[in-house]
Amino acid sequence: MKNKLLNIKNLALEQLNQSKNIDELERIRVNFLGKKGELTQVLRAMGGLSKEERPIVGKLANEIRKELEENIKNAKLAIEKSLKDIKLKEETIDVTIPGKFNSIGRRHPLMQVKEELENLFLSMGYDVVEGPEIDTVENNFDALNAPEDHPSRDMSDTFYLSDNILLRTQTSPVQIRIMKTQEPPIRMVSAGRTFRFDDVDDTHSPMFHQMECLVIDKGVTMANLKDSIDKFVKQLFGDEMKTRFRPHNFPFTEPSAEVDVSCLKCMGKGCEFCHGTGWSMELLGCGMVHPNVLRNCGIDPEIYSGYAFGMGVDRVTMVKYGINNIRLLFENDARFLKQF
Ligand code: DAH
């Protein structure tokens, strides 16, 4: 009996040594110490022992039970501790590791200038409206008093999608859309992309941006046009900024002019940037809305008059930031763009 008990103990201890998880421990406990466990069965069989042997075997059996219980408890604690250690290791956060940075984008300088212009005109009481980049030949040319033989309608100058539909060559068709749907007085600006079959050079790109302005009311004169342009140029670039109006020709305005502003680098003195002229490149075209255009849109030129201008947003951006190559605005080199 004694030997049997010692065998049970050794077997149990051996299994305990090899056990790797709590389930195995529980199985060992049930196998040896449970109701039908091996040790329990030995204890049950003690009835058949002699009076002398019984206390000795009973004591030994109890000692073994205690020892096994103790061992199971310790093994359980050891397994729990190692599980906890693994978990702690896995979940360790090294607060000294540098964080992951997502570089945040920024507004493109062209969009910044477009919004600045829109806000400026909003503050002067103009509506900001949108027009489509694909428009009809009628809106882009005919209604704007550009006859069929006008050079700007040349197939090679313009991106036609079909005979009647094209990528707008200017934002001026937005004027037509507004005049055809709204009663005067009208005060609006509209900015967006425009397209021409232009070769790329320092100041030209086949895709560029314009902002159109249109004012129609009773008694509007060229003096109002000059005053408005002077005011917004000063607001945009500063009070020292001068404007120069040069006579020009646009089919949709009469009289028409092109406007230059002082060179921002030398403020009119003449420098390398402005090729010694003191004036920056042409900024916008403007004029008094042609009576034919008003008539085409159902507005009586005997009652109403108006002015309009179309401004190169890319050019304003270039003048404002002293950029001498339009390509820089479209190459999307982050090193360049992040300066603005
Ligand atoms: N659309 C003209 C262009 O692209 C610019 C322009 C000139 C717009 C005079 C106007 C204007 O509204 O009145 O060159």
Image (cartoon, helix red, strand yellow):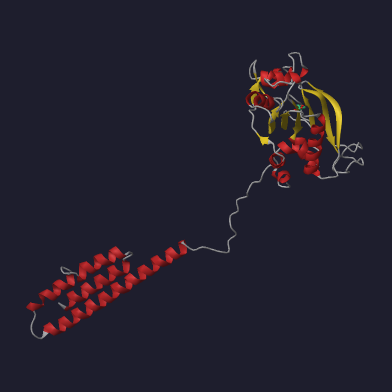
The quadrant holding residue 171 is top right
Residue 295 location in percent, x, y?
71, 18
Q: Nearer the viewer, residue 38 or 228?
A: 228
Q: Residue furthest bottom?
A: 52
Residue 231 location in percent, x, y?
79, 40
Image point (81%, 45%), residue name: 238
Q: Quadrant of ligand 1?
A: top right
Image point (81%, 36%), residue name: 227
Residue 18 visible, this orientation: yes
Q: In this picture, is 286 found above or below 81?
A: above
Assign the N terminus to one quadrant of the image: bottom left
Left or right of residue 247, residue 37 in this image: left
Left or right of residue 209, residue 95 in this image: left
Image point (76%, 13%), residue name: 149
Q: Nearer the viewer, residue 253 or 65?
A: 253
How many tags in the picture?
0
Q: Residue furthest top?
A: 149
Residue 326 visible, this orientation: no
The quadrant holding residue 242 is top right
Image point (78%, 26%), residue name: 288
The quadrant holding residue 13 is bottom left
Q: Nearer the viewer, residue 176 or 331?
A: 176
Q: In this picture, is 325 found above or below 19?
A: above
Left or right of residue 178, residue 310 in this image: right
Residue 145 location in percent, x, y?
74, 18
